[in-house]
Image: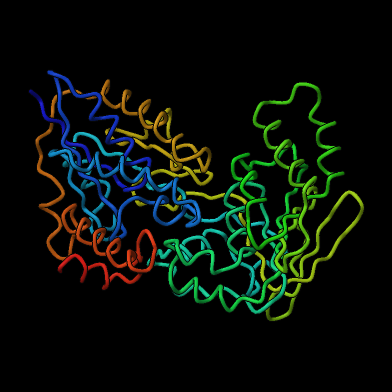
Amino acid sequence: MPLFKVAIVGAGPAGYFAAQALHNLQNEERTFAIDMIERLPTPWGLVRSGVAPDHPKIKTVSKVFEKIAADPNFRLFANVEIGSDITVAQLQEKYDAVIIATGSSLGKTLGIPGEDLPGSMSAADFVPWYNAHPDFADVQVPLACDTAVVIGAGNVAMDVARMLALEPSELDTTDTAEHAIDALKTSVIRDVYISARRGPEHAAFTSPELRELPKLEHTNVIINKADIDTAIVRAGDAPEKDVKSNLDAMLLIADSQKSEHERTMHFLFQHTPKEILGTDHVEGIVYSTPNGDVTIKCGLVVTAIGYQAAGINGVPYENGKVVNIDGRVKENLYVVGWAKRGPSGVIGTNKSDAAAVMELLVSDLKATKGAGDISELLTSQPVIDQIAWQKINEAEVAAGEPLGKPRLKSVKREEFLKLAGM
């Protein structure tokens, strides 16, 4: 029976779902040996470093990833960087197929004056900072101001606003990075504005996220009822299901607003950022609105307006995505997930996306190459394999247990290697 060797670059949801789809496509004519390559010392991608720590249910998908990794024909090569440790061309030579599943890690910019001021940052830096991503442990987040502004109308913007607006002790039982909990406990931010360029009917939030906001125990959530009423009119008699769910959830918030807490999250619609004010740091932001310009004094501005993929040598990119046709890139190179389609959908969206691309990949396969694999090329740096990762995983979970946390995350690469016994 032919054994096809496949390399997957990126150990996030898209990569694991691609591996799962290949397992499901095995039959008496073909089997697959999968090598998953990850730049970080840890797998799971955004499930570990993107999902908000106060949403632990979403992280349970990691159990699916571990089941996929238990297949005897699956190997993990973490702490390996494509470009410096090994090239895409080398992978293409050694494997029957190579799948890019690296996601989108760079934050899009607004392109307005003042965006480069200290105190203006991207969610692409802020989110991994509070999620213990090793590359972002030293990010400086200015929290000594009373007002923060988050720009964006998607779930990432809402996660950022919520993390800034909730009482930090609520994070004590989560896997938030310790350095972030310490910093947030010294924060003097009490007002957080989340702003969208368009009306509520166009917001990309999901209704479950909106419905959770009134449950915040120490935070007022303010939505102007008039904004929702006019949005309902604009949406018409037969709005799309998602739009109706969102507007219903927002109306519920607008109708049951709290004011007793000292922390408040405000929603602003039809506010287009025009300029970030300040000389040596952020002091405010100017918005263009239907009623003229509005200025909000603030010391922190976080933009959450989308992501684009970081480039890899040997892979064609355009408009923040890998150039592809239905997931095919060139020769035996394929792409799945956000790197393929841009940052859209939820974690589960990657499953159907990966399954469709893997069917194409399988239809393209001819005879196997049998030209060796990545292990022949990695001789200099420490590689974290599945067994080493399991040691890290177990150590983090054990360290979190006495603290009532799901895990106590390590942050520095040296810590990971030490936990892995290297």
The quadrant in which the C terminus is found is bottom left
Count how many numbered circles sit on residues in the image: 0
Q: Is residue 272 visible?
A: no
- Colour scheme used in the picture? rainbow
- Above or below residue 362? Residue 332 is below
- Above or below residue 9? Residue 422 is below
Residue 103, percent from left and from top:
42, 47
Residue 415, percent from left and from top:
27, 72
- Above or below residue 9? Residue 113 is below
Comparing 214 with 269, the one in front is 214
Say which quarter of the image contains residue 161. Answer: bottom right
Residue 344, percent from left and from top:
53, 39
For residue 146, side relative to residue 360 (left or right): right
For residue 304, side relative to residue 341 (left or right): right
Taking the view exactly as shown, the residue that stands out farthest to the right is 291
Taking the view exactly as shown, the residue that stands out farthest to the top is 28
Q: Is residue 234 visible?
A: yes
Comparing 366 with 347, the one in front is 347
Residue 202, percent from left and from top:
72, 38
- Above or below residue 211? Residue 379 is below
Say which quarter of the image contains residue 107. Answer: bottom right
Residue pictured at 25% horizontal, 26% vertical: 24
Say which quarter of the image contains residue 49. Answer: bottom left
Residue pictured at 40% horizontal, 67% vertical: 135
The quadrant in which the N terminus is found is top left
For residue 84, side relative to residue 300 (left or right): left
